[in-house]
Amino acid sequence: MRSLIVALGLLAGVAGAAQAQPVGMVADPCPPLAAPDPLGVEIAQAMVADVPFPPALLAKAMDPARGAAAEKAKAEKAASDWADLCRYRPENAAAQGVETVFMGDSITELWMVADPGFFSAARVDRGISGQTSAQMLLRFMPDVVALRPKVVHILAGTNDVAGNTGPNRPEDFKNNISAMADIADANRIAVVIGAIPPADRFLWRGELKPAAQIVELNAWLKAFAAARGYAFADYHAAMATPAGAMAPAFSKDFVHPNRAGYAVMRQVAEQALDEARRRGPRRASGGTRP
């Protein structure tokens, strides 16, 4: 399953990381972005479909050689651009009239695949598969602030709990969320804090049982949003079973929503965005924490 998760990254043309990289501090450190991998696109579409994963496609995705190639490309890219600052640089340069930015990981990235009509030139998706809140924090200036939106929707935490970029503390996650919020406040951007969607297992981290920790972090996120006067989008409450798992109707891999899951998330998000617009940006005040 790990190779399938890594393959989602090929949606953005990870193969481009193998090209020659500039050296030192230069005007344009980003190599040309490779064309999306057709199989990666097909995998992404299958992930969000409301039908079982096609066995033939799953076999292709799980091919060891493909998995090794995807892991190698990901490692090469991380060595030169750990936060993937290059990923959205062309889109950011061309963006105009952006009102809302969705900052996140694969759950945000796949939202565009599952429900493209939810996004537009004014509401843009800046999710990157596999990312933790630390990587998002590094991307926050170019992928959010530089677009001058009125609202930012921050959805992070699944990969922090999974330890995708190494072991970390709950406090590290909280610091990263707080820092992104502080940057938004300083730039007069209203904030929506998204709850970490439910999950009781990670197929790429089989030893972890994340349900209880996700509940604890969501309690902090909700309290943080309330203390700051931000809107809170409670995806967990909308999609969780009593045991804290993703309801089976909303996912096929226990983590990533399918189209039915994203339909639920869309309703929650629209309400939270409306609330954020009504409240407007919060005046920066030194980063109060609950």
Image (cartoon, rainbow, N blue to C red):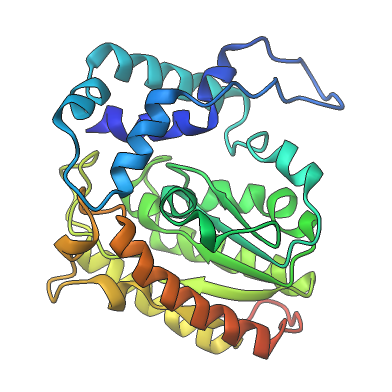
Q: Nearer the viewer, residue 123 or 218?
A: 123
Quadrant (top left, top right, bottom left, bottom right) of the N terminus:
top left
Q: Position of residue 96 (x, y in %)?
A: 81, 55
Q: Position of residue 189 (x, y in %)?
A: 73, 73
Which residue shows up at 71% across the image and 85% down it? 280
Q: Would residue 100 be found to the left or right of residue 96 on screen?
A: left
The relative height of residue 15 versus residue 1 in the rendered view (above or below) is above
Q: Would residue 283 be found to the left or right of residue 59 on screen?
A: right
Quadrant of the rendered structure where residue 53 is?
top left
Q: Would residue 53 be found to the left or right of residue 139 on screen?
A: left
The relative height of residue 242 versus residue 148 in the rendered view (above or below) is below
Q: Residue furthest right?
A: 27
Q: Nearer the viewer, residue 286 or 231?
A: 231
Q: Would residue 119 be found to the left or right of residue 22 on screen?
A: left
Q: Position of residue 105 (x, y in %)?
A: 47, 50
The relative height of residue 199 versus residue 67 in the rendered view (above or below) is below
Which residue shows up at 36% across the image and 32% down it? 42
- Residue 195 visible within the image: yes
Which residue shows up at 65% across the image and 48% down it? 139
Q: Nearer the viewer, residue 9 or 228?
A: 9
